[in-house]
Image: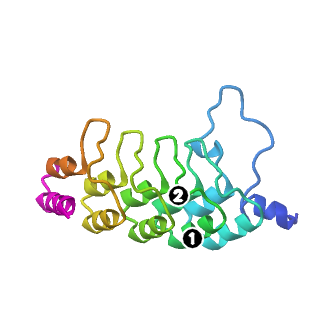
């Protein structure tokens, strides 16, 4: 039986993670997207394992490591509505406004996935509420597109700009109208008048 040192155990994610191969892939072979920069910290975030996230960060893992899609562990925690994991990552220096290859921030992923608690945390910690992704959608566009009234109210209370236009000139109000959601349109108009 072969024993690993603590550093090696942490480096490979602990708890039975297999070592990465030492030989490069065959010439012309395509590695899976996750192998391109995917770290044990990404895996811990994917599993919403806040204890393992903390252990890996304590062991020296980079809180801002990126995979081949530009995804940082905080993006993953936000997508999975992992409030504890997000708190740990932020406490260890994770970039709250990190952008992936599509220009998405952790806040935008949390909004898209309906992770209200994570959105509240990110906004309270200073996440940019008016950031746009590569299509020009802001977090408010995302919330309106998902018809999430609670999320819309939170973003508006946090200073989201209802007048931002996407790459096609659509505002959150025009998105609401295209979805036939008069209730959301009324919420946006009411906030414009206030």
Residue that appears at 25% across and 38% down: 169
User: Residue 189: image x %, image y %?
Assistant: 16, 58
In the rendered view, does 15 fall on the left or right side of 43? right
Question: Which picture quadrant has residue 68?
Answer: top right
Question: Can you see residue 15?
Answer: no
In front of the other: 131 or 7: 131
Whether residue 156 is in magenta: the answer is no
In the rendered view, does 3 fall on the left or right side of 99? right
Q: Which residues are magenta?
A: 179-194
Q: CA distance from mark 2 to mark 1?
A: 13 Å
In this rendering, is residue 126 above or below 38? below
Residue position marked by numbered label 2 in the rendering: 76
- Callouts 2 and 1 close, C-beta under 8 Å: no
Residue that appears at 48% across and 65% down: 122
Crowd class of label 2 (few under 14; some 14 to 19; many from 20; radius 10 Å): many
> Which quadrant would the N terminus be assigned to in this image?
bottom right
Whether residue 191 is in magenta: the answer is yes
Q: Kindly report which numbered mark, 2 or 1, lies closer to the viewer in this rendering.
A: 1
Residue that appears at 65% across and 30% down: 29
Q: Secondary structure at mark 2?
A: helix
In the rendered view, does 17 fall on the left or right side of 48? right
User: Residue 79: image x %, image y %?
Assistant: 46, 59
Tell me, for residue 87, which label it has, or none: 1
User: Residue 176: image x %, image y %?
Assistant: 19, 52
In this rendering, is residue 157 above or below 161? below
Name the magenta segment's main secondary structure.
helix
Mark 2 or mark 1: name the one nearer the start of the chain.
2
User: Residue 11: image x %, image y %?
Assistant: 77, 58
Residue that appears at 77% across and 61% down: 60
In front of the other: 183 or 5: 183
In the rendered view, does 115 fall on the left or right side of 44? left
Q: Secondary structure at mark 1?
A: helix
């Amino acid at each position: 039986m072969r024993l690993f040192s603590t550093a090696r155990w942490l480096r490979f994610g602990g708890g039975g993670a297999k070592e990465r191969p030492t030989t490069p892939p065959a010439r012309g072979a395509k590695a899976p997207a996750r192998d391109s920069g995917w770290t044990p910290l990404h895996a811990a975030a994917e599993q919403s394992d806040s204890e393992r996230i903390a252990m890996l960060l304590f062991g020296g893992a980079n809180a801002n490591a990126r995979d081949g899609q530009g995804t940082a562990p905080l993006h993953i925690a936000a997508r999975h509505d992992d409030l504890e994991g997000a708190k740990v990552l932020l406490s260890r220096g994770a970039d709250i406004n990190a952008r992936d290859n599509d220009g998405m921030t952790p806040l935008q992923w949390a909004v898209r996935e309906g992770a209200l608690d994570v959105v509240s945390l990110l906004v309270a910690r200073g996440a940019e509420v008016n950031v746009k992704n590569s299509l020009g959608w802001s977090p408010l566009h995302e919330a309106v597109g998902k018809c999430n009234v609670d999320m819309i109210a939170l973003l508006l209370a946090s200073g989201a700009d209802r007048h931002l236009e996407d790459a096609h000139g659509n505002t959150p109000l025009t998105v609401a109208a295209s979805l036939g959601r008069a209730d959301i349109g009324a919420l946006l108009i009411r906030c414009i008048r206030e």
